[in-house]
Amino acid sequence: MALQMIGFLVMFPLVVAALLLILRSDGIRSAIVWVSGIVVALASCAFVVMNIGAGEVLIEFSWEPLDHLCTAISCLIVVTILAFCVKYRNVWAALLAVVQLVAVIYFESAYGAEIDIPNGLYFDSLTLLMVFIIGVIGSGICIYAIGYMKDFQAHEPKGARDRRPTFFALMFLFLAAMFAIVFSNNMEWLFTGWEVTTVCSFLLIGYTKTPEAIRNAFRQIIMNLAGGIGFVVALYVSAISVGTLSFNEFISVGMTHPELTVIALIALAFAGITKAAQMPFQTWLLGAMVAPTPTSALLHSSTMVKAGVFLLIKLAPLFLVTPLASIMVMLVGAITFLLCSFMAISQTNAKRVLAYSTIANLGLITACAGVGTPEAVWAAGFLILFHAAAKSLLFLCVGTAEHHIGSRDIEAMDLLFDRMPRLARFMMLGIMCMFIAPFGMLIAKWAAIVSFVDMNQVALLIILAFGSAATFMFWAKWLGKLAGIAGQPEDVELTVHRSEWFAIMVMAVLVIVGCVLIPLISDFFIEPYVVSVYGFFGQDIATGNLWLASICVAVVVIVLFCGLGRSKARRVDVYLSGVSRDDSARSFQNALSGTTEATVRNWYMKEYFGEDRIAFVGVVFNSVLMAAVLACAIIGLPLGL
Amino acid sequence: MITIIITLIGSLLFALVAPVIGCLLAGIDRIISARMQGRVGPPLLQPYYDVRKLFGKENVSVNSVEHGYVVCAFIFACVAGGIFFTGGNLLFVIFVITLSSLFFIMAAYSTRSPYAEVGAARETVQVMSYEPMIILMAIGFFMAAGSFDTKAVFALDTPVISTIWLIFLGLLFVLTIKLRKSPFDLSMSHHAHQEIVRGMTTEMSGPTLGLVEIMHWCETVLFLGWVGLFFVWGQWFSVVIAIVVVLAVYFLEIWIDNNFARVKWQFMFKSAWAVALLAGGVNIAVLAFL
Amino acid sequence: MGYASRSPWVIHYDGSSCNGCDIEVLATLCPGFDGERFGVVNTGNPKHADIFLVTGSVNEQNIDVVRQIYDQMVEPKVVVACGICACSGGVFHDCYNVIGGVDQAIPVDVYAPGCAVRPETLIDAIVAGVKVLDEKEAALKEQKRAAKKER
């Protein structure tokens, strides 16, 4: 039964993608996306419910043609990339693509046939969590895109070619590839899914075909091809020194004989770090912001970058026994968390703030994976879940706001609480979930602190303390901007598409339910996974405290959506030190009896947290660190260290 | 389940008792400040009279949500106090009190008054300045006492101050920010009530302002509780010692308040982070590696 | 005695005074006279204040400001005209641009004459104003109760 379900989850989005390419009419497309989005979501939920609390379940499945098909897909991907390289004359991407092509073909011919993997598929509780995220949040974003892309196309210049069929097909292809990644035990299949997500995001980022989009798309492909090559290296090492391509065997061998897997582990970690856009690779995710907002939402919340951290979390038990790799992953993640939180302070563009916060949170997940203790993995699991839900909610809100207020600048979101009351509340909910206790992210941070203390990771503790403070700053000032209320500006919310509301509501409900049911999620998803990997689990956050947090969440949510705006107090104007002229415009009578408008902008502290100062530091530090670790591993290996 | 009930009861008790203690402390503060300035000063219960007066005033507001935010801030301040004084998790206390400050910040932002917004922006910078030290304090406490639960101190043989005195000094530094004392009273000041027409509370009047005042009393009690935590161990008389130390620290804060002029936010930010890095970082490193 | 009278927070506005009265107003709050003994606190914001101390006369330029500050104060509130200019316009009452005392703009409760007004007079005036404040507070309470009954 499980096998059929997995087959359905992977194949169904593929079929939908094909259908979307063939049937190009608007109405039919909407219908297909609505229906298939809901089907995927329900199927994922059903799969999760049927297997809830599962330990590791290996599924016997191997089929030789599929191996060849995977190789063929990998080649096809590389050829596609090469075609684009020729079209836009990009040498670096072409070079990396050729390297990868040769490596993959040689690998298949040399080792592919020899190594037999009986258990091609598997799932455990972490997979279930990912299936839930991909299935529900991912397809929710697809449904959101229906309305969004209608507006997007309307904003395009007249006569522009309507490439929306491709767009939606790519979105569904993305989901299929993600399902393949989380279910594959065969590392070759895993790699294929990995490469499909890379090329899909390449095409989605370049969707608008503006010079900027093309440039950013190529930046993405170069970085992720480099990561892909890391993955291929890991395949070689695994095949040669461990003699298997089964992921779970690889991990169990690594836990007992870390010296065999250290190079492969570092190579895989490198692949994960590139995909998760950790410094020095953060620029590709920032560049991805040129794409239409559903793409950003998909890349940031449920797919792509989550594939990177998913891989790292799977590898966490190996980091526990391989100090060299652990140091690399931990420090890269921690430095990224700290510096990206700093840089987020200096951004005025809402989508860039979101991007930096994504990278920062992924950094925290990466650091947790690098620490590798059961508690750290527990924290990482929660971070993945809440980050996915809250971030997709935020992206969808920003996207909708952008179409209705005509800007994605935070300063332009002044008075959003008045102009788009429902949307602003959802946005506030998302923001609160991202940084403030008792919402999920902070609970996860709490567990992270405990695990860092247990491992005596002083540097990580200090980084976490300072990074959290910076996080407070940039979210709080955005929240403040949203909270402003004055007069009775017109409500521009009425023209929001139903599909957009639907998706936003789904995300909001996920956030709320997730935060309120933290203890249950811990019992049914995260703990079973931790126990299945480590065999035991103990953590310091008592269940009583978790329930206390849920109660606080419930209070905040009730206040946000029901309690605010009921005050019966008499309304008065704001105080402007003199004679006010117009309260909602904040204008007052100046010394010459003219009218002056008071304006207030948020603080961006560019002189402390500007990108130009900080990005450089992180890029250099992390690059040197990774190079040093790799060098140590290569030198140390023959010496038997 | 029991934890939740205890915490709820504790929060209610805190909401009743802390304002009384905080009010008396505020009264003492005003008298001592007056004496330091060569004045007689108001009666001890002056803060109480002020708040009673504020609740008697007409209820006006610039918008419909401000009061709601302040009520939330007050409730969460009480919850934080409840968790702390019932022996709950120190890190959770810090998170909840941060939630309380966030609601207060949102109340100020929601008014869209330029002065209140400046105050709110300054408050976010203040939070960013003291937060690292406060988190490091919780971490240091965890390492010294072996648990985040404040009740763990009663099982100790020696007070945590013996191992994390450096963190205690760091806490004293940021305590000035948290208690809104000069030289770090950037976002709203108690003195002469004039700094950018009183920052965050610019648009708050009557009952709302009264509630802010009560919340401030509760916060004072909570923060002084943190100070006292360092001096409690398994002996009953340690509580007395802790109270004496707390009063001494409060006197020190009043003295600082009266002797230093307000600084710019740049100085506050840099110095608070430097202190956190040095005091917190060094102390934690020592605990971890020695 | 109500609570309003125990904590009269004042706001001070200089209409067109020569600064003589302003200096005395501030002197009242300084250590020498220590207004805080009676709970007097100087605020900078009408929304926090109970007693409005105006110095100097009202003219075409400042009449809107005086009215606005008065409007922004929250009930119950009391106005004290400090110094002879604020009471009646003083020696400037004939000037082409002067409208007259503060009572030309807003209702005044207590007149504190003098040129400049003495701190002792001011303290007396505030004490007198405090009584008015108490009456107004009681009236407001009555009004609230009546409104509640109606509902």
Image (cartoon, coloured by chain):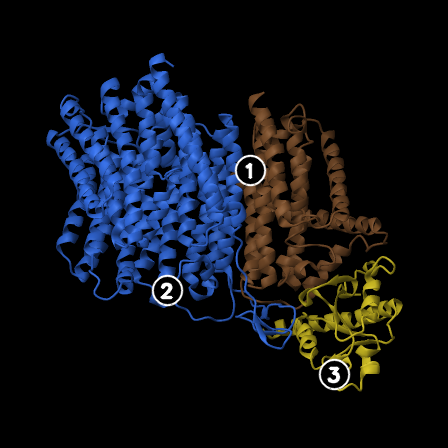
Q: Name the residue under label 2.
A: A404
Q: Name the residue under label 1.
A: B91
SS type, badge 3: helix
What amino acid type should be assigned to the residue bearing mark 3? Answer: Gln
What amino acid type should be assigned to the residue bearing mark 2? Answer: His
Q: Is residue B231 visible?
A: yes
Residue at mark 3 to residue at mark 1: CA–CA distance = 59 Å
Q: Name the residue under label 3.
A: C104
User: In this rendering, would B98 be left or right of A226?
Assistant: right
**Which residue sits at x=84%, y=50%?**
B35
Decide which of A319, A378 is in the foreground and name it. A319
**Which residue sits at x=61%, y=61%?**
B115
Q: The yellow chain is which one?
A: C
**Which residue sits at x=58%, y=31%?**
B281
**Which residue sits at x=22%, y=21%?**
A239
User: In this rendering, would A41 be left or right of A421?
Assistant: left
- Quadrant containing the C terminus of chain C is bottom right
